[in-house]
Amino acid sequence: MRIAVLMGGISAEREISLKTGRAVLKKLLELGYDAFEVNLTKENIVSELTRDDYDIAFIALHGEFGEDGRVQAFLDIVGKKYTGSGFIASAISIDKEITKKIIKNIGICIPKSYMNIEEVKKFPVIVKPAFEGSSIGLHICKNRDELEKAVNNLKSKKILIEEFIEGEELTIGVLNREGLGVVKIKPKSGVYDYKSKYTKGETEFEVPAKIKKEIYDKAVLYSEIIYKELELKGAIRVDMILSEDKLYFLEVNTIPGMTETSLLPKLANLKGYSFGDLLKKIIEPIAKN
């Protein structure tokens, strides 16, 4: 069994993907797997994905042509096995607006959203692209001028405007339908944006989250339900806000960062899984099929 670790790609999250992919590759080689790096670019995507010297693609791509279902669909066409969710589940989950409609329909709370600027009467609000990850393009707008500026500055074709919910940021891991646990995210800036995620010392993590047991258990249960409802596979993360003992779904990350200091390995550790254990549990179900 030969594993191609797909990394890089064409999205704004290319550099993050390279870090994830190389951390995964390093650990796979340490574990004795026959694995190699595939650094995807706009020019080589077709030639690299159609090569015949690998059996499984470990997808370590983030954002466009990684989490949006397109690389999964391509791999399906060429008959290659791959890690993570299928193309339909990926395409749905990358669209924050569609995902939230599904989550609302199963009875889990979501922040109030606005169709346009004119609907917003209360501030602050959150503005973000519907399709980007890593909190790219996230803005907290405290007045109408800031809101109009944020909307005009975003190049995304689809934008979300949501109420800002004051509360504690939580992230929950799910691996092969099993809830891993809950980590509390404590960014110094007050919001877990791109800078807070990728600048050393900008964010503290409470592992596990020190919240009421019934809320902790509910967050894990909700995440397992979301995993099943969206027909996800492999390892994912669900982000929520806890406000006044009420959980609000924010988004799902179908290909979480996978460096040894990333959140998903921290969540796996709550179940006693090492980084190596986590990778084995992602790969082994695919290898058996």
Image (cartoon, rainbow, N blue to C red):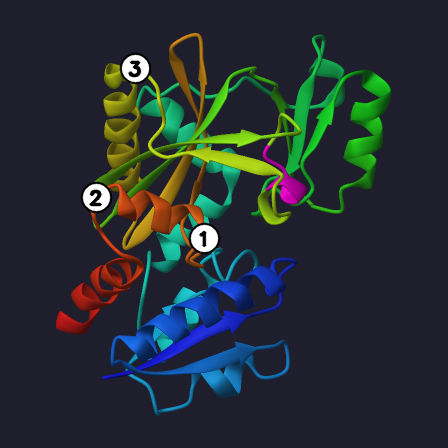
- Disc 1 or 3, which lies upstream in sequence? 3
Q: Which residues are magenta?
A: 192-196
Q: Quadrant of the C terminus?
A: bottom left
Q: Quadrant of residue 4?
A: bottom left
Q: Quadrant of residue 279?
A: bottom left
Q: Residue furthest front?
A: 201
Q: Residue at x 34, y 18 (%)?
A: 211
Residue closest to the eye, 268 or 150: 268
Q: Residue at x 35, y 22 (%)?
A: 210
| Disc marking residue 261 | 1
In the depicted structure, whether residue 87 falls above or below residue 138? below
Q: Position of residue 85 (x, y in %)?
A: 33, 56
Q: Position of residue 82 (x, y in %)?
A: 32, 69
The amino acid type found where label 2 is placed reads Lys
Residue that badge 2 annotates: 271
Q: Residue furthest left?
A: 288
Main SS category, magenta section? helix
Residue that badge 3 annotates: 212
Secondary element at tag 1: loop
Q: Quadrant of the N terminus?
A: bottom left
Assess whether mark 1 and mark 2 are in contact (beta carbons under 8 angstroms).
Answer: no
Q: Quadrant of residue 177?
A: top left
The amino acid type found where label 3 is placed reads Lys
What whole-number distance in Å separates the C-alpha atoms at marks 2 and 1? 16 Å
Q: Position of residue 164 (x, y in %)?
A: 61, 18
In the depicted structure, whether residue 144 falls above or below residue 281? above
What whole-number distance in Å separates the C-alpha atoms at marks 1 and 3? 26 Å
The amino acid type found where label 1 is placed reads Thr
The crowding category of the residue bearing disc 2, from other C-alpha atoms within 10 Å (few below 14, some 14 to 19, many at least 20), is few
